[in-house]
Image: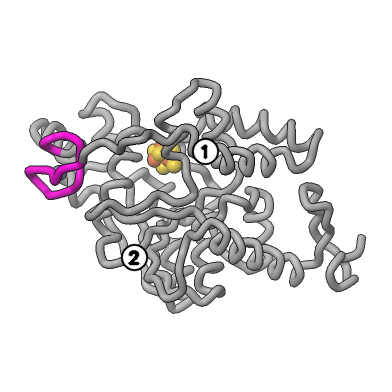
Amino acid sequence: MKCRMCHGRAVIKLPAHNLNLCENCFVTFLQRRVRRTIGSLRLLSPGEKVLVAVSGGKDSLSLWDLLLELGYQAEGLYIDLGIGEYSQKSEEKAVSFAQRKGARLHIQRVKDYFGGLAIPEIARRAKRTSCSVCGLVKRYLMNQSGRCFDVIATGHNLDDEVSFLLGNLLNWQTDALARQAPSLPDRESLRRKVKPLVLCSEREMAAYALIRGIDYILDECPYSQGSTSLLYKSALNRLEQESPGTKLRFYQGFLKSRLAFVAKEEPELQPCENCGYLTTTQICSFCRLQQRVLERV
Ligand code: Q46
Ligand code: ZN
């Protein structure tokens, strides 16, 4: 198998692009793809200060690597969720990546905001699932840490996006479809959020991390087990296997017709009376969660 670009020995087959590539040409291919995605979807402008949300996994660490390689001023944010060994190991990976690259990593700890409690205990006290509490808390801490940056970048890849898309379509969640954009504009204290990896598949990101020698956490969060998004991912993998390029066609088609789901009027936002975070209610959902959980400590 020969590399289509340099005719050396190919190590990866990309049926969706009808390409076989060697290690070096694959890295060039992926960097070019991310640069083009950033340009065509107008995700970042040169000179912008980017905060990359890193989980210690292959996608977010590779995104940080790619942005640094493409010349962006990119710092990392790791949020310690307090999920046992999973959080410990993932923090180690994020810290060692930052050290290796000489890049700055900011760390936020959920326990510092909830009287020493971590996500699983907060969820138990609030009588909610760990993932719903985790999503809310991560969004809040990300926006808070992003205040000194122009934009926040997350490592969602093509597989993540098509799996959300399938779930949103199967349940006709039009609000979620409207929000499922590769770039969400900023609204005063809420930072703009971008997803530069939306056109790169999970497999491509794993290959990139491996070739670039990025040491990432292989374990998944224990709460992701049995989630419907994993079921959608495996269904989409079957379709991709039978018809290479399905995921890209599905997502790019959505990007063309997405505006049909966007509401004409955005809901009014006002500062939370307690912390100033923009919200649709008097007190934001993070402060309400904090009050509810801390009352029971
Ligand atoms: S939401 Fe749920 Fe993830 Fe938080 S508790 Fe784990 S699986 S980490 S993306
Ligand atoms: Zn608040």
Residue 75 placement (x, y as % from top left): 39, 69
Secondary structure beneath disc 2? Answer: loop
Q: Which residue is mark 2?
A: 150
Q: Is residue 277 visible?
A: yes
Q: Is residue 50 above or below residue 130?
A: below
> Is the residue at mark 1 in contact range of ligand 1, meaning its CB lies under 8 Å from it?
no
In this view, which residue lies farthest toward the front?
Answer: 264
Picture quadrant of ligand 1: top left
Residue type, label 2: Asp
Q: Is residue 288 above or below residue 255?
A: above
Residue at position x 48%, y 68% in the image: 97
Q: Is residue 147 left or right of residue 193?
A: left
Secondary structure beneath disc 1? Answer: helix
Q: Quadrant of residue 274?
A: top left
* Count of number-bearing discs: 2
In this view, which residue lies farthest toward the top?
Answer: 171
Q: Which residue is mark 1?
A: 258
